[in-house]
Image (tube, rainbow, N blue to C red):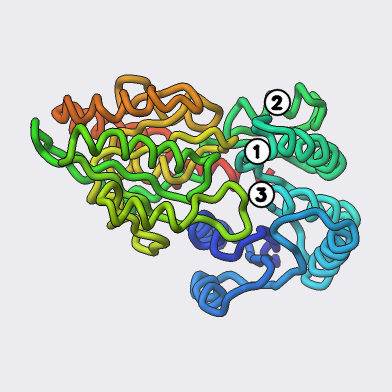
């Protein structure tokens, strides 16, 4: 019997390895023939996916913006890809791939399963722009998802919001998994033993935009460096291009030159870099699914400071393996970071509890089994 062909659709080719690499391996081991679709593939990514045993297909899709003519072309292109490759099942994640591939799959009469990996800035309701985008995206989601076999969410708050907004019907088949999972071997545990007076290293990882709390991290670093010159504040990642909410490179350079921060920029060896730090910080007000960066921090054994918001609060037992703070509250962030500077002996035990939580709840093997069971059904 021929293996079932699954088409995984995303808007950025790099995420297929960084976020779905383990899933692709597990799908192939489970008997699937895996096709990976993305726009603007780089040859290096294609080669790595081929080494895993997957096939690659380049598609027409713009990562950002709404252009009706280009969007219709994307749907038509996806339908053609589905039909030409005799795809049996479509699996998509992130906004545009979910909406467009769901419509294309429906037109091609092929079942689709969508993964909602967080609702992002669009559903943050922090300003007029986000509210307008939410109205448009809501309607597109509702039209796209209405015939999907299953819609998978990464936290129950997002599922409830889609039900409350009537984006999905109460009879529609849904599921909740705890994020994308984390490879516990790749992000290996490191014991942290800290004493009073030791240099405490705080780190934030990801796209350096205001919604992710990068500006608050910088503000907190500036405040705390004056009082605790021994503390270190590391930023891994970079500001995205063409984003009005990106942290400016000039600000990052100024803070680096003044000795306030250590700016690493984009890096590939994330596991090695974050393991050298002590406390992970993500003061986001972005609608996260379950942030992969927090899962990495849990796995390597770091206490986490993050916001009491959907997707983030699921990763913290407040006061046990980290500290939850209110969204957009600089004073609360400064106080939480100061707690670890003043009580460094808490870092080791809280980090151990982070690792245990990763093993129990966020192991990629557990998450992938749940997803594959859903796809098989």
**Quarter-of-image position of residue 242:** bottom right
Q: Is residue 185 above or below residue 229?
A: below
Q: Earlier in the sequence, mark 1 or mark 2?
A: 1
Verify CB contact (< 8 Å) between mark 1 and mark 2: yes
> On the rendered structure, is 304 left or right of 168?
left
Quadrant of the rendered image containing residue 359: top left
Residue situated in front as seen by the camera: 211 or 8: 211
Labelled disc at residue 304:
none
- From mark 3 to mark 2, how far is it between C-alphas? 17 Å
Asked whether the beta carbons under mark 3 and mark 2 sit within 8 Å of each other, the answer is no
Q: Position of residue 161 (x, y in %)?
A: 70, 26
Residue 54 locus on image (x, y percent): 58, 70
Q: Mark 1 to mark 2: distance in Å?
A: 10 Å
Residue receiving disc 2:
161
Q: Residue at x 55, y 41 (%)?
A: 370
- For numbered disc 1, what is the local secondary structure? strand
- In the visual, does 1 lie left or right of 42? right
The residue that disc 3 covers is 94
Q: Are marks 3 and 1 in contact (CB under 8 Å)?
A: no
Q: Residue at x 66, y 49 (%)?
A: 94
- Residue 89 vs 128, above or below: the answer is below
Q: Is 276 placed above or below 350 here?
A: below
Quadrant, the C terminus: top right
Residue that numbered label 1 is attached to:
119
Element marked by disc 3: loop
Q: Callout 3: few (<14), some (14-19), or many (20+) C-alpha neighbours within 10 Å?
A: some
Task: Classify the position of the N terminus by image quarter.
Answer: bottom right
Q: Residues within 10 Å of mark 2 (few under 14, many from 20)?
A: few
Measured as percent of width and height from the top left, residue 313 is found at 47, 26
Query: What is the distance, in whole Å, between disc 3 and disc 1 at their CAs?
Result: 9 Å
């Amino acid at each position: 019997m021929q293996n079932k062909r699954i088409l995984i659709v995303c808007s950025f080719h790099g995420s297929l390895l960084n976020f779905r690499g383990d899933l692709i391996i597990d799908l192939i081991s489970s008997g699937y023939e895996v096709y990976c679709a993305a726009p603007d593939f780089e040859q290096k990514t294609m080669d790595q996916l081929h080494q895993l045993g997957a096939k690659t297909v380049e598609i027409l899709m713009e990562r950002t913006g709404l252009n009706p003519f280009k969007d219709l072309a994307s749907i038509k292109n996806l339908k053609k890809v589905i039909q030409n490759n005799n795809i049996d099942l479509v699996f998509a994640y992130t906004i545009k791939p979910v909406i467009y591939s769901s419509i294309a799959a429906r037109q091609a009469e092929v079942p689709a399963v969508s993964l909602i990996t967080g609702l992002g800035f669009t559903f943050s309701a922090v300003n007029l722009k986000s509210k307008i985008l939410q109205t448009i995206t809501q309607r597109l989601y509702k039209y796209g998802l209405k015939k999907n076999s299953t819609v998978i969410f990464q936290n129950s708050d997002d599922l409830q919001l889609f039900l409350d907004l009537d984006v999905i019907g109460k009879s529609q088949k849904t599921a909740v998994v705890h994020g994308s999972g984390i490879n516990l071997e790749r992000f290996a545990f490191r014991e942290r033993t800290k004493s009073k007076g030791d240099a405490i290293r705080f780190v934030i990882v990801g796209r350096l935009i205001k919604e992710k709390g990068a500006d608050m991290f910088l503000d907190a670093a500036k405040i705390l460096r004056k009082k605790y010159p021994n503390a270190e504040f590391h930023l891994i990642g970079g500001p995205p291009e063409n984003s009005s909410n990106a942290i400016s490179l000039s600000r990052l350079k100024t803070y680096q030159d003044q000795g306030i921060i250590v700016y690493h920029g984009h890096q590939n060896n994330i596991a090695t870099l974050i393991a050298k730090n002590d406390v992970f910080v993500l003061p986001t007000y972005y609608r996260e699914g379950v942030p992969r960066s927090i899962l990495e921090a849990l796995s390597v054994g770091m206490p986490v400071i993050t916001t009491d918001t959907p997707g983030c609060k699921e990763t913290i037992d407040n006061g046990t393996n980290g500290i939850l703070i209110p969204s957009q509250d600089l004073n609360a962030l400064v106080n939480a970071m100061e707690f670890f500077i003043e009580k460094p002996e808490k870092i080791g035990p809280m980090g151990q509890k982070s690792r245990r939580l990763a093993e129990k709840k966020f192991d990629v093997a557990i998450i992938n089994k749940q997803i594959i069971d859903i796809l098989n059904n």
